[in-house]
Image (cartoon, rainbow, N blue to C red):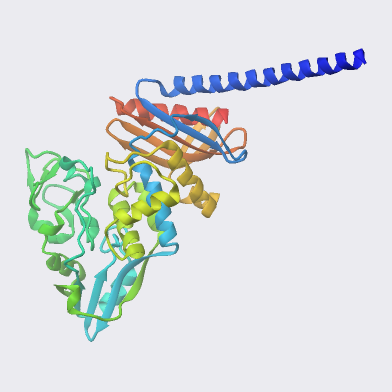
Amino acid sequence: MLIENTSLKNTIIMLKKLTLLLFSSLLFSCVSLKKHYLNTVGTQNHTGALIFNQNKGKVVFQHNSEAHFIPASTLKLVTALITKHVHPDHIPLVLYNTQGDSLHLKPTGDPTLWHPKLHQSQFDSILEAHEHLIIHLNDEETVSSYAPGWSWDDYDRYYSAELSIMPVAGNQVYINPLDSLNSKIYPHFFKDNIRVEVEAPKFRRAKTKNEFVIAASQKDSLSIPFIYDKVDLSGLISSLSAKDVQITTESEMTTTWTTLKGIESDSLIKYMLEKSDNFLAEQMLLLNSKDLYQSFEIDSLIQNQKKELEIKGRWVDGSGLSRYNLISPKELTQVLIQFKKENSLAYIQEILPKRTLNIDNTTVHFYGKTGSMSGVYNYVGLVQTKKKNEVFFALFQNNALEGRVLRRRLNAYLKWVYLHF
């Protein structure tokens, strides 16, 4: 009996030692990972990270993962996911009705009409068959030119194009200054609004009117937002469509409208993410709201989608340009995981921008979305690691004095994720 008790005691002691050894090993591993992480991204600014191992089905590393950060353009992942939900196949280009030789249109918020890269030929086909174009704009349907928290002094920057119910040419003027005497301008409607000056800055637009100035030395192509409500909209559309154009109110006509199918949703999502196009992202949120709630007001969409996507932070726009946005690494990683769950890994790899690094003589592809603005540089993405694990991850870096340092740290962080998980 004494021998049996002694044997049992020895077994218990061994199990306790093994448990302690395993716990110590795990603790050391966690401490080591945290040390490597902090050595990689530094401690001079606010950082947060989360790494989710899809193979194991669990979070394998986190640091400030539920803290709120300015997400910048990583927030476009949310806009992309909602757009895929609401419009899984195509974006509604416009609502139309024909009467005799007149084509009547109602806008949907679609951003592709006469866009230099995204304009849809099916619209031209239906337009060609009519002499007159009548556009119905409801006076009660308006949107703010800018989302909350946008920087007021970025009004003439390409990334701050104004929002509108019926965008035209991306709500920008595109200038290709081949030389000071031979510039290509689109839409050509604005040609008399542009002047070239020897001492001018690289480019600018007057703050309150559509007058543009470029330097005689300017060589690169430019895109400059125009002030939407200061434009003769009928004149602008007439110059682009070569049709007689009339703007009227929706109340002047009650009839059945037909939806003209526009760009494929996946194409628009991919283009928006690759270019990190703020204007497209904002318009996509507007057209999603119109489809869901019959209104261009996005507050209802945001409040309902926050519950659906379990976002507890602050979310105010579709592009992430606003500094009012505050989202956690955990929340945006969940969005990307949900995106893949509802579609496929191949789909995610197709729509997300690819970043390629050479790590230990191996070509490694990361798929994800960056988000940057002054003092901010974030990344949310996925990779197959050296250990053959499918890993979703986020790195948020805020409150930095020098953005270039953050960009260098991101590559080091990506290498760390690939090698350690």
Total marks in image? 0
- 392 relative to 377 in the view: left or right: right
Q: Position of residue 266 (x, y in %)?
A: 43, 57
The residue nearer to you, when weighing 273 against 83, is 83
Q: Quadrant of the C terminus?
A: top right
In the rendered view, would you say 162 is above or below 31? below
Residue shown at 30%/58% (left/top)? 286
The residue nearer to you, when weighing 327 against 364, is 327
In the rendered view, would you say 293 is above or below 78? below
Q: Quadrant of the N terminus?
A: top right
Residue shown at 91%/13% (left/top)? 2
Q: Position of residue 62 (x, y in %)?
A: 49, 30
Q: Position of residue 204 (x, y in %)?
A: 13, 44
Residue most extreme to the front: 1
The residue nearer to you, when weighing 324 against 340, is 324
Residue shown at 62%/37% (left/top)? 388
Residue most extreme to the bottom: 100
Residue 78 visible in the current orientation:
yes
Q: Position of residue 353 (x, y in %)?
A: 43, 45
- Name the quadrant containing residue 155: top left
- 131 relative to 46 in the view: left or right: left
The residue nearer to you, when weighing 19 against 133, is 19
Residue shown at 48%/43% (left/top)? 334
- Name the quadrant containing residue 407: top left
Residue 366 visible in the current orientation:
no
- 198 relative to 155 in the view: left or right: left
